[in-house]
Amino acid sequence: MALEGATAPELEIAAVSAADAGDYAVVVTDNYKTSAVSATATLVVVVPEFASQPALPAGAGTSGALRAGEALTLAVALNNAAGVTRMQWWFKPAETVDDGDGGENGTGNSGGATEWVALAEDPAGGVTGTTSVALNIAHLVPADAGEYRLRVEFPGGVIESVAVRLAVTLDPLVITTQPPAALDAAEGAAVEIRLAARAHDTAFYQWLKDNAPVPGATRAALTLPAARLADAGRYTCIVADAYGQNVLSGACVLTVRPMAPRFDDTSAADATLTPAGGDALLTATLAAQDAAFTLQWQTRSAAAARTATTTGSGSSGGSSETEDALYDDGSGWVDIPGADTDTLALAGLRYSDNGRQYRCVATNTEGSTAGGITTLEGISPTAPALVWLARPDKAAAGTRATFRAYLTTAGDGPFEYVWRKTLTDSATGAAHTTIIAGANTLAYTTDILTDADDGAEFSLTVTGAQGLNYTARAWLRVYSPTHPLYPNLPAEADLDNDGLPDNDSAGAGNANASGASGGGTSGSGSGGVDDGSGTGTGSGSGGVGVATTAPALALPIEASAPDALLVLAPPTALEHAINAIRGKNTTGAAAPTFEVVAGAPVTYRVTATGGALAYQWRRNGTPIAGATDPTYETTTLADGDRISVLITNTKGRLEATAPTVGVVAPATIAIPPAPRSSLAATAGTGVQLWVKALGDGQLYYQWERATDPTTGAPLTGTAAANAAAVWQPIPNAVSPTYRATTPGLYRVTVTNRAGGTANTALALVE
C-alpha cells in the first residue's frame, strides 16, 4: 500500500510503533512514465512484554488472604523495557470486584471500568513503587483488600499484567473486661479505673469524664494519685485501633467523699515558741483540699498540759485556771472566743504563761483535725513594783495605824508579802529591824501604838517569781500628851505637816481638816490638842470656820479619746485607785497604757479638793505652756508620753499622773487583691484572692461582694459599671484570703482596735 505523503527519496517515521512493523519498498517514476521498484526492506518493531506476572506471597495461601498489618510486595519482570514511557499500578477495591468474564476495554478493566483507580504514592502511609515494576505496601489495612495489576505504556501500545486478588483479614476490637460500675473513694486517696481490651495488634485509649476527654488519660487504666472532690463524675473510655475500629466502654461512676481537714507538715508538727517582747503570732496552714472548713484556736494551761501528759489524755485547758473552770468542755482544751482565722495574735504574755499550749482545730462535714501543739517557753518574769505605800500622816498613841500598798506592776507570782518594822535608838543611832509575824498581805494594821513607835519605819517587801522583789518604806509619827517634845512645842508647831498646829495653847477652836470647810466647836478648858479629827477645844468661844487644806484627789485623772478608738478594756477600780495616788509615786514604775490613734483629740480632766487650787499640766515632766485648767486638750500625743498635773495651794502640792500614752496605728492595706482574675484559668477550683494588711494588734477581715441595689443579685463587670452597687458581707469570709468561685466584683475591709479601712482597689473575677 502506498504511504500517503511518502514521496521523498527518504522515508522517516517520527515515532515507531508496533503498527509500523512490515516490509517497505520505494517506486521511482520519471517524466516518461517509466518506473522502477527498489528492493524490499523489512522493519521489525520490538515492544515490551511481561517476563513474569505479579503474584501474592506464599503466606497468602489459596485464599489469597494476608493479615492486617503485614507488608505486601507485588512485582513483575519486563522484557524490552527500553521503550516504556509510563508504568502505573491500578487497584479495584474488594467490594467492587466483578467475578464475571467482562471483556477487555481500553484500560483493561473487566466489567465496571470506572471501578479501577490509579494508586498514588503515599510514603507516609507506607505505599511506594506505584509507578515501577514493584508495588510496596508496608502495612496492610482492610481497605487494601481488592485486585491489583500493572499497566505499561510504550509508543504505540499498552500492556497490562494479570490481576492479583488480595483479601485482608482483621481481628475484631473487643473490650474483654469492663471498668467497675461504681467506685467510692475518700478525698486525697489514690483511685484507679481499669479495663482490658483485645485488638488486632495495638489498642489506643481515651478516657472521658462526663463525656469530655480527660487530658493525658490514654492508657488502659485511669489513675488519680490523690482524688479531689471535683474528680467525682461518670467515667467512660473510647478504645480504638489503627484500622478504624473503636468501641465505647461501660460507665464507672466515681464518688469522692470529703476527708477531714489536713494541716501541712509544718502546722501539723508540735513546736515550742519563745515570744519576743511578750507578743507572738501563731499561724496555721492547711494542706490543699476542696471541702469547706472552719477554724478554731484552742488553748490549755501549763497545769492542764502536765495533767494530759501524765494521763495520756491528749487534751488541754485555757488561758487561766479560772477560765479553764468556766469553759473547759471536759476534753482539756478550750476554745478561744473569736479566734477563728488562720492566725492567732498573742499579746502581753507573762512568765505565768510559760508552758501554756495552743493549737488550731479545723472542722468540715467529715470531722475535725487538730494541728500541732505550740508550747510557750522562755518568757522572763517581771518584778513586782509598788506604786505607793499609803500611811496615815500621824497617829495617836493608844490607837492603831493601817498601811496599804498598791501594785502598779503586778509582776509574776506566786507572791510573798513580808512586813518589817525598824526602830532607831535615839541614843546610839543603831537600827533594829524585826519581821512582823502574820503580816503577809498588801495591808497591815499595827498593834496599839506607844510613844516608842514614833519615827518607826514600816516596810513591805513583795517577792515574786524567781526571787524578784520590790520593797517600799514609810515612816510613822506618833504623838500624845506624854510625848517628850510636847510640853516644849511652840504655839504654832506643826510636826505632822497637816496644816494645823499640834498644840493650840490659845484655846481657839480648830477647823475641820478633812474637807474644804468645817465647823470649829467652842468648849471649855485651858488649851487643846489637834488629835487629827479636825475638832479642837479651847477656852475661847468656838465658831464655824472655812479652812484651806492641802490638795487631794477626789477622782483620778480621766483621759478620753474619740469613740473610733476601740479601747481594749476600761480602767479597773484598782487602776483608778493607783491613778488617784500617783502623786505619791517614787518608784519610777511604768504606768498602765492609755491607747490613742495618732492625731486624735484627747481630753484630760482632773477633779481635786482643797480650795484655792492652781493647776499646771506637764508632758514628761516639762510644764505645758497655757495648760493651767482642770482640763487639758491635745492632739499631739506621741508614743510613750506621760501626762501629769501639778496641783498646788498655800497648804501643799500634789502631782497626779495619767497612764502612759500608747499610739495605735490604724489598719492599712499594704498589698491589695489582684485587680483582675479569670475563673477559666483555675479549671473550676476558684480564684484565690488575698490581701496584705498592716496595723497594731489583731487585724479583722471581712470580704464583700457587689450586689444589685434592687434585686440583691451579685454584679459582674468593672467598678465603673457598678458604681451604685451595694456591698454585701460574704458569710465566713473573715481571713486574709478568700476563694471566689463565682464571677463578680469583690473587696475586703480590714479593721483593728484603732479603726478600719475599706479596700478601694477592687478585685474583678470573671
Image: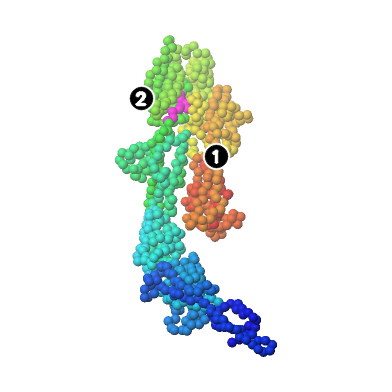
Q: Amino acid at mark 1?
A: Ala
Residue at (40%, 29%) from the top-left corner? 465
Residue 35 seen in the current view: yes
Residue placed under numbered mark 1 in the picture: 665
Q: Residues within 10 Å of mark 2 (few under 14, many from 20)?
A: few
Q: Position of residue 45 (x, y in %)?
A: 53, 78
Task: Answer whether residue 386 is magenta in the image.
Answer: yes
Q: Amino acid at mark 2?
A: Gly
Q: Position of residue 455 (x, y in %)?
A: 45, 17
Q: Residues within 10 Å of mark 1 (few under 14, many from 20)?
A: some
Q: Position of residue 587 (x, y in %)?
A: 48, 25
711 or 35, nearer to the observer: 35
Residue placed under numbered mark 2 in the picture: 438
The image quadrant that residue 178 belongs to is: bottom left
Task: Answer whether residue 699 is magenta in the image.
Answer: no
Q: Over which residues does the magenta segment extend?
A: 381-391
Furthest residue toward bottom: 33
The quarter of the rendered structure image containing the C terminus is bottom right
Residue at (49%, 70%) from the top-left corner? 132
The quarter of the rendered structure image containing the N terminus is bottom right
Furthest residue toward left: 311
Furthest residue toward right: 31
Residue 537 seen in the current view: no
Element type at marker 1? loop
Q: Nearer the viewer, mark 2 or mark 1?
A: 1
